[in-house]
Amino acid sequence: MAVSNPFTATQGAGRRTLLACRACPRLVAWREEQAARVPPRFAAWVEEHGFWGRPVPAFGDARAWLVIVGLAPAAQGANRTGRMFTGDRSGDFLFAALHRAGLASAPRSEHRGDGLQLHGALITAPVRCAPPGNRPLPVEQRRCRPFLSADLARCRHLRVVLALGRLAHGTVLALLREQGYTPARGIVFRHGAVWPLPGGTALVDSYHVSQQNTFTGRLTAAMFDEVLRRCREVVGRSEEGE
């Protein structure tokens, strides 16, 4: 079966536009305020690397077959480091799993210059600035959506979109609706589910890798390894049908 990327590019949603974006006053104020609230445990890190405090771009392989969609930067995580899922426990869980799956060159992401590479995977998010309480408003989600659309469209080898949580799942489907796709009524968020998308691609659901899930056992390392295995299985089925 031939596979094609169903996402289309959004004009003007490039990296330069992203880094200069100040469209959401609440998020701009919060992300910049965090630079003055650096916890003592990060003080030395910030002294050496600086505090990012800007919208966070996608990170990963330009030839990615797998795009992982999170939620938003953590105030003292990616908002501090400038790299998706870097600087907090959620990222520690995610990168360790990607390394076990052969998708990351190292099991831990330290900072933007640490040499870490992703192989066949790209990490992005629906919202690029840290929101207070990790809860972006609907209007903020809508304003930021073109950047996710552009990231997905650039992945010419896209096979699987892995949605970490309900917000990511819903945003991916919203992007496709904007392009005229009508999802089947039964496509709802469910951990471990694999849903067909246009062009022979697939949407795979997982609980978010947040501490709220990983520290309580709702999402274990073995469970997430199984999700990544299903992502590879989708690719294998596609190649068998070509």
Image (cartoon, grey):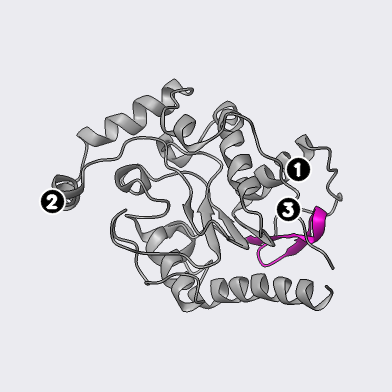
Local packing at callout 1 (Cα closer than 10 Å; few below 14, some 14-19, many 20+) is: some
Residue at the spot 24% in from the left edge and 35% down from the top edge: 35
Query: Where does residue 202 sit, x and y in percent of width and height?
Result: 74, 60
Q: Which mark is residue 176?
A: 1
Residue at the spot 60% in from the left edge and 30% down from the top edge: 138
Magenta residue span: 191-205
Residue 79, quarter of picture: top left
Mark 1 falls on what kind of element?
A: helix
Q: Is residue 151 above or below residue 120?
A: above
Q: Earlier in the sequence, mark 1 or mark 2?
A: 2
> Residue flagged by tag 1: what amino acid is it?
Leu
Location of the N terminus by quadrant is bottom right
Query: Where does residue 191 sit, x and y in percent of width and height?
Result: 65, 63
Mark 3 falls on what kind of element?
A: loop
Q: Which mark is residue 116?
A: none
| Residue beneath disc 2 | 44
Q: Earlier in the sequence, mark 2 or mark 3?
A: 3
Mark 2 falls on what kind of element?
A: helix
> How far apart, in angstroms, are the residues tagged by discs 1 and 2?
43 Å
Query: Where does residue 12 sit, x and y in percent of width and height?
Result: 58, 29
> Residue flagged by tag 2: what amino acid is it?
Ala
> Residue flagged by tag 3: what amino acid is it?
Asn
Q: Say which of marks 2 and 3 sits in front.
A: 3
Q: Say which of marks 3 and 1 sits in front.
A: 3
Q: Earlier in the sequence, mark 3 or mark 1?
A: 3
| Residue beneath disc 3 | 5
Residue at the spot 80% in from the left edge and 78% down from the top edge: 240
Local packing at callout 3 (Cα closer than 10 Å; few below 14, some 14-19, many 20+) is: many
Query: Where does residue 4 sit, x and y in percent of width and height?
Result: 77, 56
On the rendered structure, is 2 left or right of 62? right
Residue 82, quarter of picture: top left
